[in-house]
Amino acid sequence: MTPPPSPPQDRRALDIERRRALVASALGTVFEWYDFYLYGSLAGIIGDEFFAGLDPGSAFAFALLAFASGFLVRPFGALLFGRLGDLIGRKYTFLVTILLMGLSTFIVGLLPGYASIGVAAPLILVALRLLQGLAVGGEYGGAATYVGEYAPRRRRGAFTSWLQTTATIGLLLSLLVNVGLRRLLGEAAFVAWGWRLPFLASSALLAVSVWMRLRLSESPAFVRIRRAGRTSKAPLSEALGRKENLRRVLVSLFGMTAGQGVIWYTGQFYVLVFLTHTLKVGGGLAGLLIGIALLLSIPLFWVFGRLSDRIGRRPVMLAGCLLAVLGYFPMFHALTAAANPRLASAMARHPVVLVAQPAQCSFPLRPQGGVPFTRACDIAKQALSALAVNYRRRAGRGVTRIEVGGASIPVFDARGLSPPRLQLRRQALERTLQAALLAAGYPARADPAAVNRPLVVLILTLLVADVAMVYGPIAATLVELFPTRIRYTSMGLPYNLGNGWFGGLVPTVAFALVAHDGGIYHGLWYPVLVAAMSFCVGLLLLPETRGADIHAEDGGEPRRGCL
């Protein structure tokens, strides 16, 4: 039942404790996301540093795969730390997660590269990414549960939406540090050694975050059920073994967090990869433009969280999914024309065509990793992907070739060639292809003077606004959906499956789709289809939770009638 009203002095003390809980949780989460996205914003440099044994295209792809590995283990982190949070409390559990995250990040800054320790470098890097993923998997569930259980009932969407801004602020901070150090040190020094400084500097942020979290009290909702002896003895069994709660987990995953995850990573991370790798906008300028868009969009998380307190969580999040489904392709086409007009013009006037037998073309990512492709179609696709060329495939017999403008470039078959000979032939092909592209009007880099900066910022802001629509209300929804005794475990699993697996794989899956099919927009099919799935499932099955009394289940029985 709802707790009785508190006297004024108790309410003032509670308000102070609420603010302290929000600030400490938010600061720690900003730090964790800053750490996590440092890797993403430096994926190109990290690929060269730790995957130098591969060709440039494969090195970039495997750097993205190493980035994705951290997301893949997030659900396991949610189960591990969620169980601890429901057994021993919220406060100490997400104190452990921030320590684990911070130390892993610091070690990345000290880790020798492939040139120094060989294959051990990427193996240790992936291990550190896995530790970071486990920590993030436990962090969000703890922070959202903690803040949500402190939040006022009628303002839970607005209150928890401040926590939702932290991922964007962390991403913004990582971009600002990245751009600032590039300009301060110069590009050559930054690539050589300066990229390590943001990882090492995170130790100061770690110290502040740990100090603030040590000053927190335990969540009042958890204290209440612990005093009543109603904490769960087996959170995993209750969360996943009870049919009713398992159904809530699955509906929240497929009808909410999966769509939110792909929208988040498309609008705030993949778009940065698209700007720099595909549209060839300089890293400094791209970081500056998306940084401005992030700054403009941060208040929108609170706006949509507050709106969900007024009209409901469900309509706000479903509208965000629908906007992604209908708007991604037009917005990314508009982004190409605004950020690199010469590229857009060349693509329209002189489309690139790969003529090859379909049976000779393999999928660009495969378990063999370092084993080189030898068939002509695959070599052509690698060369086109390395230069981020938009192309289409046409079935044809005879010699595999790349047609651009008036040129027809034959592509060799590498079976039987020694590795040094293969490397020389590949480099010669890329030089010939690059010369043909330049002759057809394809720019090697985007001209900074030709970038329509106001329009690019507007498009980026719209993409992040869509993120705010689906992300602003989601913490309140998850807190309200599950009972207190198993809330940490229950909400952490669908959130981290949606964000870690569906969302975290956006860059890797999109890159693979583009490399396989050739169209620079083909990678968008993945987030569009997942967002469409969440819209349909959410429309049919997701309950409205606005204003739910989260203390009503302190007796241990889940609420009925929502699903």
Image: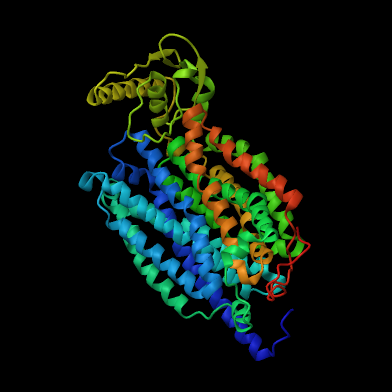
Q: How is the image coloured?
A: rainbow
- In depth, the one of 81 and 298 nearer the eye is 81
Residue drawn at x 33%, y 21% is 429
527 left or right of 358 in image: right
Task: Say whether residue 89 is visible.
Answer: no
Task: Say whether residue 305 is visible.
Answer: yes
Which residue lies most toward the right here? 561
Q: Position of residue 351 (x, y in %)?
A: 50, 21
Q: Position of residue 401 (x, y in %)?
A: 42, 15
Q: Position of residue 259 (x, y in %)?
A: 62, 48
Quarter of the rendering occupied by the C terminus: bottom right
Q: Is residue 504 above or below residue 516?
A: below
Q: Is residue 140 above or below residue 277?
A: below
Give the number of callouts. Answer: 0
Which residue lies most toward the left here? 116
Q: Position of residue 199 (x, y in %)?
A: 34, 58
Using the rendered view, name the quadrant where residue 34 is placed.
bottom left
- In depth, the one of 392 and 548 nearer the eye is 548
Residue drawn at x 71%, y 55% is 316
- In depth, the one of 109 and 497 nearer the eye is 497
Using the rendered view, name the quadrant where residue 1 is placed.
bottom right
Residue drawn at x 74%, y 68% is 547
417 left or right of 90 in image: left
Q: Is residue 4 above or below residue 551?
A: below
- In depth, the one of 265 and 218 nearer the eye is 218
